Amino acid sequence: MIVRNFVLSTVLAASSCLAFQAHTPLNVRSSSASRIQSGSSSLVMRDYPKPNVEDTDNYRYANEMSRSFKTTLKVTDPSQKKKVAIVGGGLSGLACAKYLSDAGHEPTVYEARDVLGGKVSAWQDADGDWIETGLHIFFGAYPNVMNMFDELGIHDRLQWKIHQMIFAMQELPGEFTTFDFIPGIPAPFNFGLAILMNQKMLTFPEKLQTAPPLLPMLIEGQSFIDAQDELSVTQFMRKYGMPERINEEVFIAMAKALDFIDPDKLSMTVVLTAMNRFLNESNGLQMAFLDGNQPDRLCKPMADHVEKNGGKIITNAPVKEIVTNDDGTINHLLLRSGEKIVADEYVSAMPVDIVKRMLPKKWQTMPYFRQLDELEGIPVINLHMWFDRKLKAVDHLCFSRSPLLSVYADMSVTCKEYADPDKSMLELVFAPCSPIAGGNINWIGKSDEEIIDATMGELARLFPTEIANDKTWPSTSKQGPQGQAKLIKYAVVKVPRSVYAAIPGRNKYRPSQTTPIPQFTMAGDFTSQKFLGSMEGATLAGKLAAEVIANRAKGNADKPIKEIQQHIIDAAASYVPKDPVGVKGDGAIAFGGGYTVGQQEEDLLRESDPAQFVAALAK
């Protein structure tokens, strides 16, 4: 029993560091060095076989749910077949359409933009280079996404990397350290071994101090995890006497990677949810890159599947208004083109900030919809930076542990479509980028040049012997003559309202997919599901929305509406309805996505979301 408790404590200490703590490499191919130096990486630059992601309870549940659309929820009589209008062609809307088509229904996706994907969309610039809304990584612990890849036959499009996490060392510029998972060692013991071998970050006493507060997560499970939503990561850490240094060494990197937010703003439920998944799944933290752009390599197979099964995907079809009858039921959707869309069922797969702008007056006093006021998308910025030569990078995602940057990757190394033997293209997540996320500056309101200059300063720290002293970027002025790499091109993608801000106390306001409006269902990663705001969350939410409709079509009772907080109910009773604001303008940002911001986009953003600029102007 003493040995078992010691192992449990060790594993808990490991889980607290999760994948975001730097570690001494455990290179199974050779005797490992204690760190990776820029320019002398010991990593093997190649893709790895797909790990076994199927042998988990979460995958089995996802697979069984997928099968239900072709069995118990399958249309067996023509009267059960429904024409379904889905507003939004992101992952959630496409997943909803995919599973409805599997069940024999006739879904049509109406996407406002000329490209599918929503927050995973991408487009080509004038040079033909792909610009992505975000740096998207696939984890082994994404059961619904992995199951969908299997159903679509596109597992070969994932480039799996070595089961390892790589981190910049704050105190040693230009050097990195790793967290290694030894093949064949199951979870949670792979965590424990990695932590025990690490001598670079937390001391052994600090690791032991970290373990006790996390015991209830393993003992009580989801009920304990959900109860921590009222606490930020920092508040949880201090409440339970965890070492302050773990915030600097671990939680800042973890929080920024999970939700583009600092730990004093992030709900502890988000961190515990991730920990719980990764603790129970041996390959949960293994990562993969898509082998090319998301529209072609991910969204198109989903769209093709829907159309093959009799559904439709329509782009450039923005919805102007949800037109209701006197009793609040939907009469039709009115497109900007003037076309009226009448269906048997309707699904919103729009971002939460757009949903709020579209709510009909008849719905505005309903507590279900008033709770959406408690949710808002968090700003994030994605950067693409092309250099005139090859940086000495690694074939993996890197956690920068920078005050301005979250994670980054050299896409010319990690992704087949973007491969370039002569030049590097870094894709970086700039976060936190607003006071909402815990930042001191609202970078959404700053110019592209200011953002790139700040980033170049951070890259000079990460690559001190490679980044050149370039007069174009004052932040590189301290670089020595050894640095030669110069920036030759960049793209700044601003997403003013990305995934919902997972600040403390928000989980209880995330709505169920079932709504109080007959024949109207809600999708989107902000809706209630256990995988939070992510590609997995979006996919699962769309799947759950499809389940609501397919279940209803079989004549079964609706799944229950999630409990709504009493103060929301009270406030809704006195709310004065207003004409819906609707969506102003065109383009990605208008409809809740991200894009490179020119003057036209900035003017629209200043009008529709002035909060994005207030803090920046005050600085």
Image (cartoon, rainbow, N blue to C red):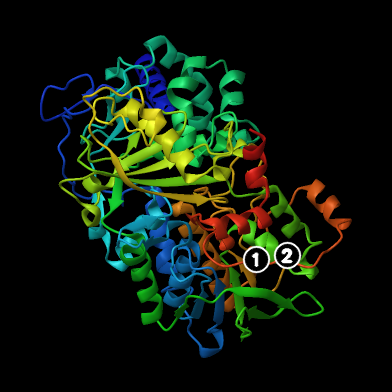
Q: Which residue is mark 2?
A: 581
Q: Residues within 10 Å of mark 1 (few under 14, many from 20)?
A: some
Is residue 77 in view? Answer: yes
SS for callout 2: loop
- The kind of secondary structure element at disc 1 is loop
Quadrant where the image shows the N terminus: top left
Q: Which residue is mark 1?
A: 584
Q: Position of residue 195 (x, y in %)?
A: 32, 21
**Which residue is more in the foreground, 436 or 371?**
436
Give the answer, above or below, for where 469 lies relative to 280.
above
User: Which residue is rendered at x = 42% and y = 75% of the image?
Assistant: 102
Q: Nearer the viewer, residue 580 or 243?
A: 580
Amino acid beneath label 2: Val
- Tell me whether the residue at label 1 lies in contact with that at label 2, contact meaning CB atoms closer than 8 angstroms: yes
> Residue 516, image x and y in percent?
72, 66
Q: CA distance from mark 1 to mark 2?
A: 8 Å
